[in-house]
Image: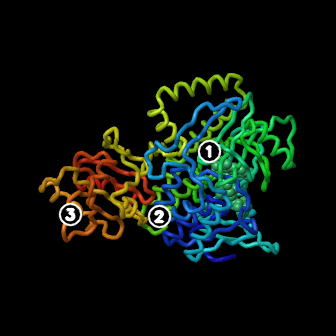
Amino acid sequence: MSGYLPVLIVGAGPTGLMMACELARQGVSFRIIDKNPEQTLSSNATWIQTCTIEIFDHIGIVDRFLKIGHPCDGIHLYIDGKSLVTIPLNNIDSIYPFVLMLAQSETERLLIDRLEEFNKRIERSLELIDVKQDNNAVIATIKHADGNTEIITSDWLIACDGANSTVREKCHIFFPGENLTEQFIVADAKIDSYMANNEIHVFFDHGAIFAASPLGPNNYRITANLHLDYPRKIFTEREVIEMAQERAYGAYYVNKASWISSFWIHSKLVKHMRHDSIFLAGDAAHIHSPAGGQGMNTGLQDTYNLAWKLALVIKGKAKPALLNSYQLERYPVVNNIVDQTERLTKMALFDKAFLSKLRKFSSKFLHNEAVLSKKIGTQITQLDIRYKESPAISYDESTSAKSPRQGEHAPDVIIDSSKRLYDYLRNMLHNILLFTGPGPSAKKNELDKLKQLQKLLNQIYSQQIKIYIITNEELKDMDNVILDVNNSIHDRYNIKHPSIYIIRPDGYIAYYSKNFNHTLIEDFLKRYLY
Ligand SMILES: Cc1cc2nc3c(=O)[nH]c(=O)nc-3n(C[C@H](O)[C@H](O)[C@H](O)COP(=O)(O)OP(=O)(O)OC[C@H]3O[C@@H](n4cnc5c(N)ncnc54)[C@H](O)[C@@H]3O)c2cc1C
């Protein structure tokens, strides 16, 4: 039996890697194991949604992704080979107005690089074969490559072991849902095409779907349904070439298909993403149609949500009840994704009226493009995710209609050519933002109140929380002041009067108020912090 351990992460796909990177950043001790001797070499999930790009920015690794990813700022839909409509993604409220196309193997490589910077390594060829819980401990039986077994006892286990999760099976956790009968083909291909390379092109015919997602100049991921009455395993390059020609009406000429695979769509979700000391995340907890490219993103966001909470509990800084918010925040988000993608996929494949519904949607969209493109773009890029009912968020006071709301990811803002709001928030702490209001110069007594509040909160929370004053006025001899030179943060947050925002370590907004009574802030933080 090996020694005691706070956290065991099972599975080093994107979900497990995000958990490991975040726990490493928080300085929490863990082991991460994977049964595979090496990481995924295939492209699998290729869309990195804007919401995930913002998260990568928040944890300080976005440049690595931007350097090698391929931005796409629109989704172009066709019926019978004729252009129908383009849904632009560049009207969204983000400094990254696009989705980033990158092979999953590259995403995993960048996360592994990040992990190694913390001197942490994945232990490969280690397979979890059994798990049980006893007296608040998790006891996992691990098989090594030489056939020997090891018992790992940990306080917590994070099951990131994918769609066929052994943890889920051994804990008898039901995985209800549906298996769709339709088989799909995916291929990575070198392609010659005159089609815009900054858009994802999706072709619909009667019951047939073909999508070409650019991964770089002449590099594409193509996906199509197969219309087969029987399952098939092997596909040839010739079939891929012909399918691309036929379904996209000659718009794509495949020169080489480097990777060809197939998949079926499953729509499944566990009822509870936490079972005492075991948390399920990513494909181990939910699988769904790849429509909209949300699978990997959802897994990354699961563990991003969980890691800071677990770290604070392990360090004795937060109450264990904080961990209940994982289910309460993530389950409704995932449930919605599973529902929506299943509905859309079934409609596109099986609804005989789908093409006329798509035409109707297109004309409605074109009539009101300015409003709808922002709304739909925000949904597609996952920027609409909001934790609506969480004990770790206060909804007591409403924000104004145009302000970011509690439960949403705090938007970044460009302050000037050298500074952005996120530069102040990449610190793994709660951040309290005390806005002075946008006037040319905030009223002196208001400013004094804020300074006093900042001082008091600093005394109470010293190392645990950063408290910033955001003002357009230079405040001499004061720490933690964000100089909002052009009022751009005030504008983006639609702040007209002195106001308070509390941003959690995962960048989500926990609290908003115009009331500067410090006991209200303390009462809120006492809900889950010691
Ligand atoms: C062909 C294909 C195409 C896809 N295309 C898309 C797409 O376009 N868009 C999209 O969003 N998603 C797509 N997906 C899904 C996407 O790849 C997954 O959502 C994503 O990989 C989930 O990440 P994960 O870390 O939760 O699980 P996984 O990536 O499955 O990782 C699980 C890890 O756990 C390890 N493991 C499993 N059991 C054990 C055990 N008992 N002990 C130790 N280790 C274990 C595995 O070796 C694996 O490394 C695709 C998947 C496939 C297969």
Is there any visible trace of residue 283 in the rendered image? Answer: no
In-image side of 2 versus 239 (left or right) = left
Picture residue at 44% right of the left edge, 67% below the top: 316
Report, in whole angstroms, how far the alpha carbon at label 3 lies from the one at label 1: 47 Å
Instruction: State the image quarter where residue 1 is shown.
Output: bottom right
- Front-most of residues 305 and 293: 293
Give the percent coordinates (x, y) of residue 412. Answer: 40, 54
| Vertical order, 74 against 150 (above or below) | above
- Could you tell me residue 290's position as x and y percent? 66, 44
**Observer-nearest residue: 20 or 412?**
412
- Which mark is on residue 474? 3
**Does dot 1 land on a helix, a strand or a loop?**
loop
Q: Nearer the viewer, mark 3 or mark 1?
A: 1
Q: Quadrant of the C terminus?
A: bottom left
Few, some or many residues within 10 Å of mark 3 (<14, 14–19, 20+): few
Image disc number at residue 313: 2
User: Which residue is tagged 1?
Assistant: 196
Nearer to the camera, 167 or 212: 212
Q: Amino acid at mark 2?
A: Val
